[in-house]
Image (spheres, helix red, strand yellow):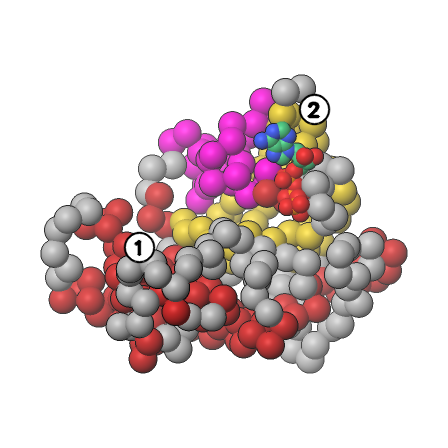
Amino acid sequence: MTKSVVKLNDVSYFYDGTPALQHVSIDIRQGDFVAIVGENGSGKSTLIRTILGLLNPQQGSVELFGKPISQFKDKSRISYVSQKAASFNSGFPVTVEEVVAMGRYGRLGLFKRLKIEDQAAIQNALETVNMWQFRHRKIGELSGGQQQRVFIARAMVNQPDLLILDEPTVGVDQKHLQDFYEVLHMLREHTTCTFVLVTHDLNVVTDLVTKVVHLDHGKLACNCGLREYSELGELASSIKPYPVKVLIHEGTR
Ligand SMILES: Nc1ncnc2c1ncn2[C@@H]1O[C@H](COP(=O)(O)OP(=O)(O)OP(=O)(O)O)[C@@H](O)[C@H]1O
């Protein structure tokens, strides 16, 4: 049995007394690729913020890597890419390489010089997302999809065990969407990371997803494998604004 990475036990979260998560129990295990889906306002971001320890649920408990979240200190094992990452304008005076270097600062202390191993980690992360050749370009001069690749590289530069992506393709045009998901495929191939992805584009990642967590008004409507999920026809097609026809690819795990 693989190790537990994230465990929520009967978690409820309330904003000013209004429930956003209700009795949610999930167990994400090492190597999983979990898609979190649900309509707008169903509690996806609240769930992510709870996993990241940014929200403290009023009910239930959260464990990370087998420890109660209050005792979990090794933050570098978890990386997060938010939906607002790709929002730099062209004047922003920071290069691609510097953006990824920022991912090392937590480990380095802000003004320490990069050592050879830091430079190697930055190169490796940028090569993994096929952006090494853009390292000297200003981040704001890149397309939304390219910027997101750089943010993925920044998230991966410390080789985390858990990568959380909150709707990373918001603002990425259709043309670059497939391109972006190819990066996820590459990461899946070249790392042992566990992935949690909030998405409305389940179709594009069906060959990666091992588990679907579907939230409905803060409640767990489904926590199951993709095949089982695809059989819940009405539930699977109720995702808005992009109705999903779940396709099972050859080789789905
Ligand atoms: N800071 C807040 N204060 C009060 N209510 C909030 C707050 N953040 C979220 N909510 C409410 O909690 C519920 C769940 O919101 P959440 O952002 O988790 O949903 P979501 O599924 O991520 O939505 P979306 O797909 O639109 O991003 C919604 O009803 C939302 O209005």
**The image quadrant in which ligand 1 is located:** top right
Q: Locate residue 168: give its quadrant.
A: bottom right
Vertical order, 248 against 52 (above or below) = below
Which of the image's four quarters has the N terminus?
A: bottom right
Amino acid type, callout 2: Thr
The answer to if 56 sits in the magenta stretch is yes
In the rendered structure, find residue 18 and report the number of the disc placed on it: 2
* Depth order, front residue of 56/2: 56
The x and y percentages for residue 208 are 60, 68
- The region drawn magenta spans 46-71
Q: Judging from the image, what secondary structure is the residue with disc 1 in?
A: helix
Residue visible at 42% across and 59% down in the picture: 89
Whether residue 244 sits left or right of residue 49 in the image: it is right
The answer to if 57 sits in the magenta stretch is yes
The x and y percentages for residue 17 are 67, 19
Q: Earlier in the sequence, mark 1 or mark 2?
A: 2
* Dot 1 beta carbon under 8 Å from ligand 1: no
- In the displayed orientation, state which residue is furthest to the front: 91
The x and y percentages for residue 79 are 41, 52
Q: Judging from the image, what secondary structure is the residue with disc 2 in?
A: strand
Residue visible at 69% across and 27% down in the picture: 19
* Depth order, front residue of 98/64: 98
